[in-house]
Image (tube, grey):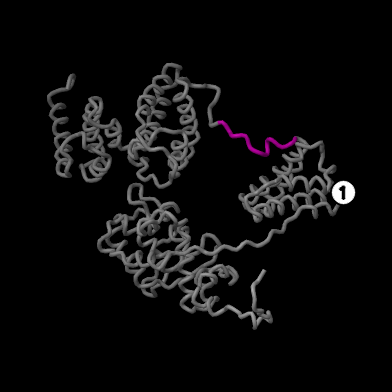
Amino acid sequence: AEGLSAREVKAYCYANARFLMYIQLHGYETIEQLDYDVLLKFSVDDTHETATAKRKFNAKIRRFLAYEANKGKCSIGHAFILNHLLIPKVVLEDDFLSNDVPKGKAELLWPKIEQFGKKLGDIGYSKNTIRISRHFLILLFLFFDMFDLAYSEMTALQWFDHVKHQFNSSWISMNRILNQFFLFYKSGDICLSQTAFPRAEQMIDTIPQWCRPSVDEFLKLLEREGREASTVMMYRSSICRFCSFLGQTNINSFAEITAEDIINFNLQDIHSTPDGKAAYNSRIRNFLLHLTDQKIITNKYLYRAVPIISAPRRRIAEILTDNEIRQIWSVDIDKLDPLSLRDYCMVSIGLGMGLRSSDIANLKFTDINWQKQSISFTQQKTGKAQIMPMPVRVGNAIFKYLCEGRPKGNYSTYIFINHRKPFGRLTRGVLERALHRFIDNSDHLHGFHILRKTFSTLMLRGNNEISVISDALGHKTDNTLSEYLSIDEERIRLCPLSLEMLGIPLKEGVFR
């Protein structure tokens, strides 16, 4: 309280007494028990006549929490979270992280951030640049501290990829700050010559220089034709593998390629599946056809040396067992908390209606017609418009979630959203984890798509016509359902043919 007037001391006492009474009413007896949840709840519940009054009030509480943090009684992050400039940008969900991010405490992160700010000042950066850098890195620290994550560049990059849209065009500057901080964290110094993430060497940069003009021209042609970016990338990857092989030979131009060279390439070009190899070869073949059209290759039949056919591969579809299906449908939705209710709704839509995870995540309020008990949507994968009847138990679950589980307010037009601010739309990873919540010993389950396969199999077992099932799934043809036929055990037992019917004589004796 040094340097403060009696009036200011009284204001500090009032603000912090009000804060401490609030956390005590919520079951917190000591500062050591403090967590981010109650602080975020306090920031919403504690109202003032004006926004300015609230900011001044919270500033006094933040100063008190910083004092307690210096004594080791709470995290320094607790002193930052009530900042009105930070709260809108704080990431409150970690569902976008990969499963291999390291857990723990980033104990050195905050001291490094403070040292980084001091270093910027020592080498002459402006106060405004230092302030912006500090603001950005506090957001990074809060994310690591809130979710008990050990510091790693991989985790920080995933966080930045998730939040960079919040900074609009300034994300490039934030990119530079993060890169400089990475270097400082490792070396204790700032490298002025490097202002962005070093670009990883791409495969196309390693191919022979004589290949590059023709490859670049072909890829630009694909882009002008309106090919998807993923398609162009697949072509680039395939052609670069071929060109890298040519670089290991004595060939110095595409005109020198022979059928024997192509055969040797395929002998050493190993893929995990025959389908994958055929897909790559198909694109190499098209590239050779392009070179032939350009008169670069004179042998107009050379492309035929590239094999593009692979034997079809069939898999037995994986579906839920009868016991696992019972586990899902036996859940009492009246006993679920809001987050579990959200997850159960998504699982019930997948199992009861066969929607893909991407389509469930994209569902909006306008997609549901309660009078007709149906859901209409456009499939993200195929672009096909679809109208599906909504089973009663699925509709009941959705209705209960909207009334009792979903955060109140017009946060988003999407039905299923994150349950923490900023209440954004869900990612596919959330739906996959939702399935595991309602099935015991679910480690063997691979992805949310198993619900769609189970739905189609149950329809098949219910003696529905193949065309009806195909329409329900939004398939363009009926051929896609062939993999489910092998699971219909009851009717498959009616299919065996006797040796006599096949004209195969059965002889007695021992087979040798």
Relative vertical location of residue 80 with respect to residue 295 in this rendering, above or below: above
Q: Is residue 184 magenta?
A: no
The N terminus appears in which quarter of the rendering? top left
Q: Residue furthest top?
A: 122
Residue 321 in the image: state x and y as whole percent: 42, 66
The C terminus appears in which quarter of the rendering? bottom right
Q: In terms of depth relative to the viewer, which is nearer, 108 or 427?
A: 108
Left/right placement of residue 479 relative to residue 426 reads right
Residue 2 in the image: state x and y as whole percent: 17, 19
The three-letter code of the residue at mark 1 reads: Thr
Q: Residue furthest front?
A: 509
Indicate the secondary structure of the residue bearing disc 1: loop
Q: Residue furthest bottom?
A: 501
Magenta stretch, overall SS: loop
Residue occupying image coordinates x 44% and y 57% = 445
Q: Is residue 207 magenta?
A: yes
Query: Which residue is tagged 1?
Result: 298
Q: Quadrant of residue 97?
A: top left
Residue occupying image coordinates x 43% and y 57% = 361
Residue 403 in the image: state x and y as whole percent: 28, 62
Relative vertical location of residue 76 with respect to residue 285 in this rendering, above or below: above
Residue occupying image coordinates x 67% and y 47% = 270
Relative vertical location of residue 13 with respect to residue 239 in this rendering, above or below: above
Q: In terms of depth relative to the viewer, which is nearer, 232 or 120?
A: 232
Q: Look at the image and give the residue range highlighted in magenta.
A: 198-208
Q: Quadrant of residue 122?
A: top left
Residue 343 visible to the viewer: no
Q: In terms of depth relative to the viewer, which is nearer, 155 or 331?
A: 331
> How many numbered markers are drawn?
1
Residue 347 in the image: state x and y as whole percent: 39, 62
Residue 61 visible to the viewer: yes
